[in-house]
Amino acid sequence: MKVLIEPADRIKGRLAAPADKSISHRAAIFAAMADEPVLITNYLEAADTLSTLDAIEQLGALVERRSEGLMIRGVGLRNAQTPAKPIDVGNAGTLIRLLPGWLAGQEGSVFELDGDESIRRRPIDRIAEPLRLMGAAIEATDKRYPPFTVEGAKLHGIDYTLPVASAQVKSCIALAALMAEGPTTITEAVASRDHTERLMVNAGVKISRTGNELTIYPTDELTLPERIEIPSDPSSAAFAIAAAVLVPGSRLLVEDCSVNWTRSGFIEIAKRMGAVIITDLEERSKDGAIAQQEPLSDIDVTAGPLKPTTVSADEVPLAVDELPLIALMACFAEGRTRIEGAGELRLKESDRISAVVTALSNLGADAEATEDGLIVNGHGSLRGGQVDAAGDHRIAMLGVVAGLASQEGVEVVGVEAAAVSYPNFLEDIAALR
Ligand code: S3P
């Protein structure tokens, strides 16, 4: 599906952003691993997180839709059923990397996982290696791609340093650690989103963090709260925030959004570029303690002029899904913006370094790819043109925001890809014009 997004006069109003995708995936998987029923309210009803509900149902969990939310009755940590057919994760990278952590601990059972064309291009060796070290057997296509099988085993704890900053890989190992013999320590050079850790605290798991070293102790069962409320997704809210920053005369209030410090990199970088954003960001705890709650705040955004910036490797995981928006915003600043240490972007739903550079260049921007990031020479405005989402939800939404802020409008091809994380995106944007 193609849409033509005309330049906006302004972005104005209040936005209740959709539920957080990362937390929805995790809450459903945790509920499936629990013995007692859990009510999840405000679960994200988008393609990716619906794949997770299908997956946990195939593994034996019962998912009941109630007016107040999803009632999930899990199977317990060690009792996942073997599905009759392969688990199809669709487009969901988080699902295909987290779920094997749980499956690796199902002694004597074999599970097959597969996904769409984009998933089949994304390597899973980064989870296969630590899971093998813990005792599971993984057989992948060409040694590193889906479809692949996980053979559950009696696991043992490991000390593992993550070769890449990835919350997905960290979370996969952390889930396996729950069923292992002995503690597991995971070291990450750069902090990444910590929703799994917070849920573990809430589930009564013994878990501690010193600096960037995380230790998880095994447990017999998860004791989750009876109800888990999913907050709004800062990565989805970021699209409207960027539009409000870029379109002169705009004023946007995003209501009750997650401001977890491991997800707030986009707001920090945007503020550094000169964006006027007022919000109550959570601070990182100095002693490394893991917070229990997901912090919420309103986010108040006003349009204003921007300056270029440099985004460094240690900021990348805190803004990883929003870097395309930083690149777009850089087109409107005068001067050179550089994003460094973001090689991971090449392994997302598309190669997002080349996808962003192609999209922005087609709109008249001066953008170039580097091996691990990109450079944008901003000239204060963007002409417009055509963006092909090529199946990547965040590129589809990037095209829409670019259209709102452009001089001549943007035609977005394949805009339906947005439904992977944000099914009502076009309606929400239309309501803000
Ligand atoms: C996610 C982590 C990030 C992010 C993805 C969701 C998660 O991936 O890009 O959209 O829910 O853990 P990596 O941590 O692998 O970079």
Image: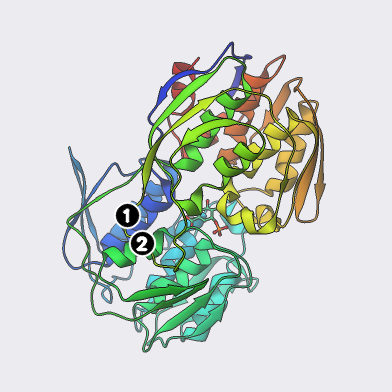
Q: Is residue 268 left or right of residue 257?
A: right
Looking at the image, residue 64 sits to the left or right of residue 312; the answer is: left
Quarter in which the N terminus is drawn:
top right
Please state which amino acid type lies under the numbered disc 1. Answer: Gln
Q: Position of residue 9 (x, y in %)?
A: 59, 10
Reading the image, the residue beneath label 2 is 198
Q: Position of residue 8 (x, y in %)?
A: 59, 14
419 or 308, nearer to the observer = 308
Residue nearest the observer in this picture, 103 or 222: 222
Q: Residue furthest top?
A: 9
Marks 2 and 1, how far apart at CA: 7 Å
Residue found at the very far front of the displayed protein: 286
Colour mode of the rendering:
rainbow
* Residue 390 visible here: no
Ligand 1 within 8 angstroms of badge 1 C-beta: no
Q: Position of residue 86 (x, y in %)?
A: 42, 63
Q: Quadrant of residue 293?
A: bottom left
